[in-house]
Amino acid sequence: MNKNSNLSILLKGLLLENPVFVLILGTCPTLATSTTVIGAIGMGLAATAVLICSNVVISLLRNVIPSSARIPCYIVIIAGFVTIVQMFIHAYLPALYDMLGVYLALITVNCIILGRAEMFAGKNTVGKSALDGVGMGLGFTLALLMMATVREVFGAGSFAGIEIPFISNYKIEILTKAPGGFMVYGMMIALVYKLTHGKAPKKSEFSCADCPSAAFCGKTSCTAEKGEEK
Amino acid sequence: MKSQIKTVVSLTVICAVVAVLLAVTNYITAPIIKKNEAAQVNGALSVVLPSGEGFEAVDISKYELPETITEVYSEKNGGYVFKMLTSGYGSDFVLMCGIDANGAVVGATCISSNETLGAEKEYGKTLVGATGETIDGVATVSGATRTTDAYKNAVRDALNAKIILGGGSVDLRDETQILADNLNAALPAGEGKFTPVFITEILEGVQEVYKAENGAGYVLKSGENFIATAADGTVVSDVADDVKTAMSDNAKKLISSKLTQIDISGYADMPTQIEEAYKTDSGNYVFHLKAAGFGINGDAWYNPSGEYIKIKVSATKDGKIIACETVSQKETDGIGSACADKKFYSQFNGKEQTNYKEIDAISGATVTTNGYKTAISKVFDAINILKGVS
């Protein structure tokens, strides 16, 4: 598959470049909101909405935003969309609003969104950026859903709030707590690595062109010695 | 320079556009959010007052209600629902409480809170059925005294507010205010500034003594009465002659009481809790004690202060405590710190070696209470040592 085809841009977020399990971004909301399936889906879709909108707008403005002030501009745009999404959820889905609490507002500082703005939307066309937003957002949602399924089913003995007979008598309560979150997270990363047979991009394969730190890093690739000529 | 201007302009424009978008969104969503919250309040109304019908918001600006009451709803059958904002251990929390036409609590629930122990989630149930007369008897939750105290006080405010709304009147003054008012009424010459006097003599029928800071005289609390005297101890309040004589004697006895310090370094087996000892002319003793409470013996996990509780005790030579007072303490705030409350330490007044343990412990502060009791027990040992009895 061509690396830059639209389909591959859309699909890479789901598994090969899954933001949570492969890029290890957005860890904080992942651990915090993956205790219940409903919360995970709500959080994932809210973040997806923000991600698509911010990717599109940032891509549209990529030639207007001066590079020296791009981070503040990105943050203002992202925070604006997050607040809009937050207001709509507060108005139309108050139960979800209460469930997500402060993590909804914290989408603003979710690394996935700023990361995609910086690594992708700031350098690609609107269409591709929108596809990247959809793919990464769904990848985030999928990751949250997988973690939440394990944590809610085995930790709380229910799925989406519906009690599961038998399992609910043998809850592993630690899974609903922070340590359980880390355990499930680690196992999921291992599983995804196994599934992709190591095809996921390794650290050394990230090109410096996409790297926000390239300017002051001074290396030609992540595995190269510092000072090598580019 | 050009690029700097571009930076400023683009950031300003982006911020302005985002602000406009937010304003539009807020314009659309704010009324819906408000409607949802009102529906939530209505739901809560029928939870705390299930029998209520046709709730209506009451305009509380017309009444002088306790400050904790933020919203009031009336209903057809004469009941009321109160929304209260109070502060517990962590921060502010919001309660709702339904009171029926007879003035009894029907339901109480916590709407939002940020307390550490979560005791407020269930505490409302224990208050069901309480009235203005019985609410003081409802126990607080051990270990979460401050949270549950705040809860109880807020519900008491609601009970009072119900009376005010019904056209009655309620004494909304707290204990400190009542005391200050009583002292001022008894001795107006004191100009409202009084300090408690540590009682070192047996005073018949007197529980507390206050001194006017400007030297105008003293006020003796005898039962429910406040009797004022001049600086020399002559009673100035208008009371029966026998009371006048008795109170005058009491006041003069206290005014003339002189303390002489005893050098305790000469007594090898003097308990270490005794820091200073004094003797009055009439043969009573006054001790300055240090008690190892939670600050010394506390679980290191909870970061004890490392400070002793300092206590002052006066006692007769026969070993009967006249007065006891906590001078300073650094016990856990909100728990062991209750040892500085008059309610706690005045329990030792009149106690002897045989019955000093019969006091109400501080809820949730066993280490503090035990340390305090141990220190008090040393008073009796010290008296025996000073008298030469071993």
Image (tube, rainbow, N blue to C red):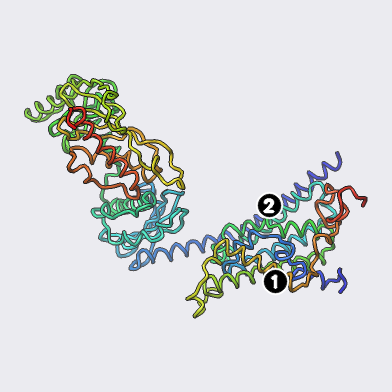
Which of discs 1 and 2 lies nearer the camera? The answer is 1
> Looking at this rendering, what residue extends furthest in the right direction?
A229
Residue A125 pos. (x, y %)? 84, 63
Residue A135 pos. (x, y %)? 75, 69
Q: Give the residue at x 13% y 25%.
A: B248
Residue B64 pos. (x, y %)? 34, 46
Query: Which residue in the structure is indicated by mark 1?
Result: A191
Q: Secondary structure at mark 1?
A: helix
> Looking at this rendering, what residue extends furthest in the left direction?
B242
Q: Which mark is residue B19?
A: 2
Q: On the picture, is B99 further left or further right than A179?
A: left
| Badge 1 and badge 2 both on one subunit | no
Mark 1: which amino acid?
Answer: Leu
Separation (CA) of disc 1 from disc 2? 44 Å
Q: Is residue A219 visible?
A: yes
Label 1 chain ID: A
Q: Secondary structure at mark 2?
A: helix
Q: Quadrant of the C terminus of chain B?
A: top left
Mark 2: which amino acid?
Answer: Ala
Check disc 2: other Cα within 10 Å, few if <14, some if 14-19, many if 20+: some
Residue B192 vs residue B289, the one in the foreground: B289
